[in-house]
Image: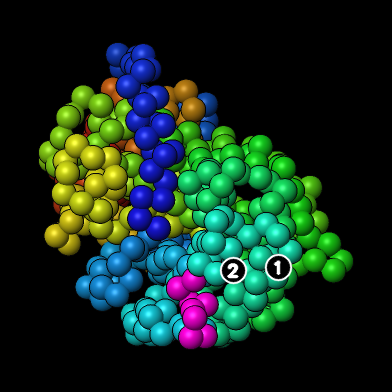
Amino acid sequence: MKNRTLSLRHRLFAALASATLVTLSFASEPSVVTLSASQPASAANPPYVDLPGFVASRDNTGVAVHEIGDTKLLDAIKNAGFTFIRANLFWQAVDTPHGWNFSQYDKLVADLSARGLGVLFILSGQHYALSPKGPPTQPAQLNAFRTYAFKVAQHFKGKAVRYEIWNEEDHPTYWLGKPSADDYKEVLKKSVQAIKTADPNAIVATGGVQQINRAFIRKVGDIGGPKQAAPDAISVHPYRQTEPETVFADYAALRRDLSTYRKKPQVWATEWAYPSYGYNYVSDIDDGHSQIARERQAKYAVRLLLSNWIAQVGLTSYYDIRNDGRNNKDMEHNFGLLDANGEKLPAYTAVQHLFSFTGDAEGAQYRLDANARYIVLKLTAPRTTKYVVWCYGTGNSIVVDLSRLPANARVTDMYGAKLNAGGTTFEVPEAKGPIFITIGA
């Protein structure tokens, strides 16, 4: 999985280098956001929208791991609040000259189980003997790949294991040849059928396409039928140079496409993050290790997860747990929540606080003002009401009116540090990230 989306990210980097950056302008007076549990909807304060899938979406959030034998990473993942990891289970790694060998993955699944974690395995790869020059496309190769998928699902039946069929099959580097929706469809059909035969309760998704490549997804189409099992989810990798909140429209468009499927699949975001170097939002900072860049990364990490949970995607896998190297000017070395030495970065601390803050939520609602560009997330928990409030758009700012909330309302920043609200109103600039408000016990 290491450097698996390198070409896409470099294309995004190139687009940044050649693009004219547009600075959005906002009104000189920040919009006022009034918080009150009993406040009626108005033009200034639009109604809350229920999020029945928020809790399930939050609880299905994991992170990519490259070094699956490093149990310290697994401890860090558990302590952050994630519930699973995403990792490769390559074909030729288990289908060996000496027979099927799952030993390293058995250890991983056992290590994860000991920590209450699951795994999303990516099934993919060429095979040194059965498909040595590219992906399986010929009948014998497809049947061999089907056997691989069957053996894996049979071996891990009953474990906290889910499956993703391939990774970025719409890119030549990861498809191992010229991408073909027709060829991938055959791999998908064989694999899903094999997995569901081996374990009818198994959960399986399509491979995550680059960004949200709806054209490729449409070409693959709905494979389900009376004699053909369908995937439970369609996976995407929503990388973008724009802000996390721009993903809402993309998810809505994809869901419209999927609404015609016989068995409506979930949408999974199996890979997404923002590096601290090489993207628009840090384009004025030429150092991925600078504190400012890393604090911006933390802000975007929190907003990315919140956006996915509000969008109620079926599963999120953040990319990734640890930096892949130490070069402060290499984008691929600056995606992690931990640095290359395993030390916590600001993004780790912010994500950990987000999981802690939302962990007892039993219900969720939100309101979004597309003109003023702010979001209010309201959570109900035992004996408490909680809010997460933030605005988006570089240079934007809002004023949060706390006057209708109890005097003991606790306000913190995105790391959990208590803030002095300064009376009844509190300015929240985009640059500082979301604020967190707790009322009650």
Q: Residue at x 53, y 51 (%)?
A: 176
Q: Which mark is residue 140?
A: 1
- Residue 207, label in figure: none
Instruction: Say whether marks 2 and 1 touch (CB < 8 Å).
Output: yes
Spot occupied by residue 137 in the image (x, y as percentages of width and height): 67, 57
Image position of 250 (left or right of 110): right
Measure the alpha-carbon separation of dots 2 and 1: 8 Å
All told, the count of numbered labels is: 2
**In the image, is residue 49 above or below residue 16?**
below
At label 2, which amino acid type do we have? Leu
Is 95 part of what is drawn in magenta? yes
Q: Secondary structure at mark 1?
A: helix
Q: Residue at x 72, y 42 (%)?
A: 219
Residue pictured at 57% horizontal, 35% vertical: 249
Residue ID for mark 2: 130
Residue 302 location in percent, x, y?
A: 33, 48
Considering the numbered disc 2 on the image, is that residue within a helix, a strand or a loop?
Answer: loop
Please report whichever mark, 2 or 1, sits nearer to the chain's N-terminal start: 2
Pick the residue in front: 145 or 8: 145
Q: Which residues are magenta?
A: 92-99
Badge 2 crowding class, 10 Å Cα cut-off, few under 14, some 14 to 19, many 20 or more, is: some
Magenta stretch encompasses residue 391: no
Residue 217 in the figure: left or right of residue 176: right
Asked if 188 appears above or below 258 in the picture, the reply is below
Image quarter for residue 400? top left
Q: Is residue 404 visible?
A: no
- On the image, the x and y values in percent for residue 75 come to 25, 73
Image quadrant holding the C terminus, namely: bottom left
